[in-house]
């Protein structure tokens, strides 16, 4: 007998898309519609065997089998979005396919216009910039503090937001990334109060913070702290499948959900994957269930365990919450004396079969996920102890390459104007002194090295090691 719901609380947790998919699976119809693989028969058997026939049988799109539609949300999808809104503390939630990227694009398209000013932190994800290129709004950059010792960006200072708002009476939106990829948290409460004072909406790209509303040992979610709109990459840490995300509009926001929905309608696929939508529904229900709560508590305890093990090491260090900012404990940024982050990453991968979230010049990022077991962390700690006790040599100088862009831009032309200006491709060694014609941002972390209209300087070259040519403005 299937045993999923264990107690009274869990019995009340519904997952309408999952239920509708189950019903469709149990009651198959003769299918004369897309997707043309027709429940997995029209594809390569190797692929079918790999992912399983069952997975392909529930790979369907909206409109069929009473599964509802995504835009506008109807049926089980609408119900699932409403349940998500309540779980995350929002007035309205939209399910997103194509990740938080499409959420950021829709925010820019739906809420900003050509020539409007938007306050944005420079270390934002490239999707924010793509959104601004599409809408034509101009970024007013906030350059957060650089934590050079760790090779990462610090938080956004609320007073910097206020300075820009005071100097620019025509700002249409403040758009902050919180937390950073490495888990550094900004004071969103203070930023939200400033935004209210100046009557400017606050958008928070909380792509990396979707678990926060589900455990009080994690930072407070921006929705609670006064943000108007929040984007969450559920697929990053929330347990849904890759590409699936959510966009929330807060209870007291004056922002028009219709404007956001209209933009989403333009940007979203017209064949949304029910599998991905179902995975969002499942992830939310799991996080609310006793099982999910335990998994999250375990992720936090695993992170604390790893941190306490690292505290015993002499050459490996982790970014702690006492370094001056709040952090998300589940994101463990570590560095080793004498080793670059990239070198440490390859030692873990090649010598120990461990793959981490990302690595940069100084260190690397380990995520303590809800799906990880304690034994995963015991193994990782053992390996780090071995590295700590072994004299590994760095070969970083061979790479001669930098990874985490921490540059202050020199802007010569507006983003959109530059993006649509005539361009040419030139060898990289002739690029210094020219204006970039493209968004250069490696993923991860997806933070821009250069944007259209910015001056290319000698300082950019170490970040462009993999580029032979570069697109510049004519
Ligand atoms: C801060 C931030 N925002 C948005 C995104 C885009 O998210 P997605 O991959 O869900 O499209 C990312 C991706 O890494 C990100 O780091």
Image (spheres, grey):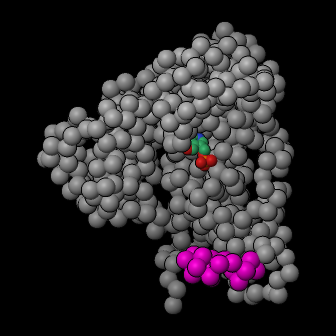
Report which quarter residue 329 is drawn in: top left
| Highlighted magenta segment, given as a residue range | 37-57
Q: Quadrant of residue 355?
A: bottom left
Q: Quadrant of the C terminus?
A: top right
Left or right of 457, for residue 277: right
User: Is 41 included in the stretch rendered in magenta?
Assistant: yes
Say whether residue 371 is left or right of residue 87.
Answer: left
Residue 6 or residue 241, whichever sits in front: 241
**Residue displayed at 54% across by 38% down:** 442
Q: Tell me residue 213's x, y (percent).
A: 53, 49
Which residue lies at the image location 78% right of the left edge and 23% below the top edge? 421
Residue 298 spot, x, y in % from top left: 36, 60
- Image height of 195 relative to 26, above or below: above
Residue 238, image x and y in percent? 53, 56
Quadrant field for ligand 1: top right
Whether residue 431 is in magenta: the answer is: no
- Residue 218, percent from left and from top: 43, 46
């Amino acid at each position: 007998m299937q045993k999923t719901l264990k107690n009274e609380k869990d019995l009340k947790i519904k997952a309408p898309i999952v239920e509708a998919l189950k019903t469709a699976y149990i009651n198959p119809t003769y299918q004369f519609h897309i997707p043309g693989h027709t429940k997995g028969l029209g594809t390569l058997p190797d692929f079918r065997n790999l992912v399983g026939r069952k997975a392909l049988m529930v790979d369907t799109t909206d409109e069929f089998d009473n599964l509802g539609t995504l835009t506008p949300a109807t049926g089980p999808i609408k119900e699932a979005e409403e349940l998500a809104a309540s779980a995350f503390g929002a007035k309205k939630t939209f399910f997103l396919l194509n990740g938080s990227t499409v959420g950021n694009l829709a925010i820019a398209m739906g809420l900003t216009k050509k020539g409007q000013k938007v306050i944005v932190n420079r270390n934002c994800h490239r999707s924010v910039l793509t959104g601004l290129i599409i809408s034509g709004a101009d970024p007013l950059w906030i350059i957060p503090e650089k934590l050079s010792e760790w090779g990462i960006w610090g938080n956004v200072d609320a007073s910097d937001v206020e300075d820009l708002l005071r100097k620019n009476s025509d700002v249409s939106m403040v758009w902050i990334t919180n937390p950073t990829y490495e888990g550094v948290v900004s004071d969103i409460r203070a930023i939200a109060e400033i935004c209210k004072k100046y009557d400017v909406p606050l958008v928070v790209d909380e792509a990396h913070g979707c678990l926060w509303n589900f455990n009080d040992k994690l930072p407070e979610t921006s929705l609670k702290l006064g943000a108007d709109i929040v984007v969450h990459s559920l697929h990053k840490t929330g347990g849904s499948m890759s590409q699936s995300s959510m966009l929330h509009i807060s209870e007291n926001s004056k922002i028009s959900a219709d404007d956001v929905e209209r933009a989403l309608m333009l940007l979203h696929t017209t064949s949304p994957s029910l599998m991905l939508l179902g995975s969002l529904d499942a992830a939310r229900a799991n996080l609310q269930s006793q099982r999910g709560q335990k998994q999250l508590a375990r992720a936090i305890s695993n992170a604390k365990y790893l941190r306490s093990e690292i505290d015993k090491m002499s050459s490996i260090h982790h970014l702690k919450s006492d370094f001056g900012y709040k952090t998300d404990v589940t994101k463990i940024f570590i560095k080793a004396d004498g080793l670059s982050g990239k070198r440490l990453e390859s030692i873990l991968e090649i010598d120990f079969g461990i793959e981490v979230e990302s690595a940069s010049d100084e260190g690397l990022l380990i995520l303590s996920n809800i799906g990880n077991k304690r034994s995963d962390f015991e193994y990782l700690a053992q390996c780090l102890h071995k590295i700590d006790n072994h004299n590994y040599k760095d070969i970083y100088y061979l790479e001669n390459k930098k990874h985490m862009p921490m540059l202050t831009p020199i802007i010569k032309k507006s983003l959109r104007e530059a993006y649509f200006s005539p361009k040419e491709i030139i060898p990289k060694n002739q690029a210094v002194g020219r204006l970039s014609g493209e968004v250069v941002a490696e993923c991860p972390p997806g933070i821009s090295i250069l944007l259209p209209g910015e001056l290319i300087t000698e300082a950019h070259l170490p970040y462009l090691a993999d580029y032979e040519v570069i697109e510049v403005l004519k």
